[in-house]
Image (spheres, grey):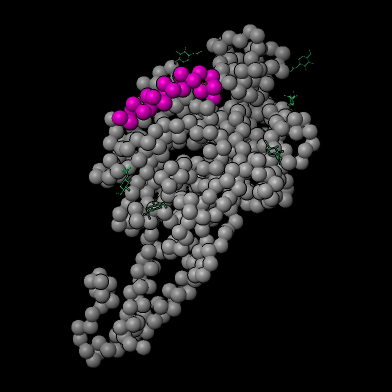
Amino acid sequence: MSGGAVKCSCIWAFKLSLFVSSSNVFFLNPQYGIVLDAGSSRTTVYVYEWPAEKENNTGVVSQTYKCNVKGPGISSYESSPGALAKPLDDCLNKVKERIPVHLHKNTSVYLGATAGMRLLRLQNESAANEVLASIQNYFRSQPFEFRGAQIITGPEEGVYGWITANYLMGNFLEVTWVHPYRKETMGALDLGGASTQISFIPEDPEEHFNSTLQVKLYGYNYNVYTHSYQCYGRDEAEKRLLALLFQKSNTSANVDNPCYPQNYNTALTMKYFFGSLCTQSLRPANYYPNQLVNFHGTGDPGLCQEMVSLLFNFTACRDREDCSFNGIHQPRAKGNFVAFSGFYYTINALNLSGHFSLDNFNSSMWFFCSQSWSQLQFMLPKFEEIYARSYCFSANFIYYLLVHGYNFNAETWPQIHFQKEVGNSSIAWSLGYMLSLTNMIPAEGKLIQLPLKPSLFAGLLVFLTATALLCLLFLVYLCIASHHRKNIPRVEHVFIAE
Ligand SMILES: *[C@@H]1O[C@H](CO)[C@@H](O)[C@H](O)[C@H]1NC(C)=O
Ligand SMILES: *[C@@H]1O[C@H](CO)[C@@H](O)[C@H](O)[C@H]1NC(C)=O
Ligand SMILES: *[C@@H]1O[C@H](CO)[C@@H](O)[C@H](O)[C@H]1NC(C)=O
Ligand SMILES: *[C@@H]1O[C@H](CO)[C@@H](O)[C@H](O)[C@H]1NC(C)=O
Ligand SMILES: *[C@@H]1O[C@H](CO)[C@@H](O)[C@H](O)[C@H]1NC(C)=O
Ligand SMILES: *[C@@H]1O[C@H](CO)[C@@H](O)[C@H](O)[C@H]1NC(C)=O
Ligand SMILES: *[C@@H]1O[C@H](CO)[C@@H](O)[C@H](O)[C@H]1NC(C)=O
Ligand SMILES: *[C@@H]1O[C@H](CO)[C@@H](O)[C@H](O)[C@H]1NC(C)=O
Ligand SMILES: *[C@@H]1O[C@H](CO)[C@@H](O)[C@H](O)[C@H]1NC(C)=O
């Protein structure tokens, strides 16, 4: 073998390994995109980055920055939409520092609003439009290319979350040297403040043709079952619980709450829990928005679970097997799932992570719910009161939703992975939304383009090891040769000059 050939493969190996190890930081020509996830309880700004020349490849887009906008979600600004600008500005100023100035004009901004705004639009469409218009107006003074503020539908939210999760986990495209083949995808479970979504590919997609969405990605058709349950987000579900407790209580001034920690007391206005569209039907005849109601925590997990069960209607399913609750059709949940956002934050507060047994979850939940308020404050020092007091409720709600609603059991529960991000990219519908709107997940695949995916990576590793060995031999050869001859060009030199 000639020295030139060996040198060549060394250079190639070096380049490949450079690409493998630094594909996230070595963008010669990066592009950026910004998505504002306008949720019911808050707005989050995500900045994504990718190499422009690889935009159609899978797995190249990553999140480089995230900023939580101070204050509540945009739907809370219905009576003062102008006040949105200041907190948005604080985040956008930080975003501007993360994106090179010359690329600001070339960076698109998308705003997607979810269930909080869907509810506001149902309640008062002109108020919802004013909020969106004020955001539109705000972005007129920004250097970025604003691509519109939209209220996305529940099914869109579900599918974009599913796309994000599978994109980040590299499930869309498996490339071998010869044939591309289809990999298993993961189901996605998203728990927001006002709605919750379940999305997965059923066992027999044809049987569920009516309830699945056809998504064509990289040349493959996926029949994704998705459903979004309005008013089953964490915050709205808890308002419904408070409304039910109020309704069942004999006094309207003091109400026991078995889901709040023992000895926790708080006074809430009736508007706080009856003001929402989700609890409107439960409003008493004597509804005074500003009247205070004292809630007293009794920390009783058994009773909490019983009250949580009242948030679900199973009679509407009439014992049909392919039915979750409230009469909603759902094929049997199959395969692995990733549970993110509110699901993750709740199990994290219970000191759980990843996947674990259902028994483990139940006992952690009972332990957590049995703590008094003073013990809990000690255990969760970093958490704000409104979050800390509600984790027992959300844990019970998650348990009930997943086990009795979606029909996970002791056997299938460990297939749910509670996870909030992959690498540094959050699992959230926002990335899938941007990928779709920018056509970065082409409908028709021109498939093989050397995106480095795990199995290819394994093959590559063997190849790299082999070439590295050859390189070593070559270096030994150089060493020996340099004893005889000076000024042999070094490998690095050749690489840079090339
Ligand atoms: C990505 O795909 C779209 C549609 O297939 C195409 O128009 C575009 O040129 C592609 N971009 C790159 C960088 O290959
Ligand atoms: C940014 O520049 C690229 C390449 O010139 C172009 O394809 C893209 O549409 C531009 N994006 C915006 C938002 O102007
Ligand atoms: C709906 O919102 C508009 C604009 O904020 C407000 O003027 C109007 O009074 C609201 N209507 C109702 C029924 O609340
Ligand atoms: C699908 O929808 C059509 C029309 O809405 C209906 O006639 C049919 O029975 C449905 N099929 C299933 C399997 O639900
Ligand atoms: C309300 O009053 C009824 C009858 O007086 C009693 O049976 C019930 O236990 C009371 N409920 C609560 C929550 O105190
Ligand atoms: C449950 O759903 C059924 C059928 O839609 C309805 O008749 C019933 O009133 C509901 N029950 C409750 C408690 O909401
Ligand atoms: C959950 O744990 C509690 C306390 O250990 C126990 O009493 C209860 O039966 C468990 N529930 C289930 C469904 O396993
Ligand atoms: C979680 O673990 C930390 C550290 O071990 C501990 O301080 C905290 O009390 C635990 N919290 C719960 C809810 O068990
Ligand atoms: C995630 O971010 C941290 C801190 O910015 C960085 O050190 C790390 O390399 C990143 N990880 C990945 C997989 O990009």
Spot the residue most to the right.
319
The magenta stretch is 119-140
Q: Which residue is pictured at 63% across the width and 51% down the height? A: 336
Spot the residue most to the top.
286
Query: Which of the two residues, 141 or 23, is positioned nearer the viewer here?
Result: 141
Classify 411 as above or below 456: above
Q: Which residue is pictured at 71% across the width and 27% down the height? A: 310
177 left or right, relative to 288: left
User: What secondary structure characterizes most of the magenta part?
Assistant: helix
Residue 109 picture quarter = top left
Query: Which of the two residues, 235 or 303, is positioned nearer the viewer here?
Result: 235
Residue 77 picture quarter = top left
Residue 263 appears anywhere in the view:
no
Q: Position of residue 74 (x, y in %)?
A: 44, 26
Q: Position of residue 282 (x, y in %)?
A: 66, 17
In reply to whether residue 131 is colored magenta, the answer given is yes
In reply to whether residue 7 is colored magenta, the answer given is no
Residue 321 picture quarter = top right
Q: Position of residue 434 (x, y in %)?
A: 43, 43
Residue 483 appears anywhere in the view:
yes
Query: Which of the two residues, 367 or 304, is positioned nearer the viewer here?
Result: 304
Query: Which of the two residues, 263 or 368, is positioned nearer the viewer here?
Result: 368
Quadrant where the N terminus lies? bottom left
Q: Which residue is pictured at 56% across the width and 40% down the height? A: 158
496 left or right, relative to 469: left
Q: Which residue is pictured at 44% across the width and 78% down the height? A: 466
Q: Position of residue 320 (x, y in %)?
A: 77, 38
Spot the residue most to the bottom.
484
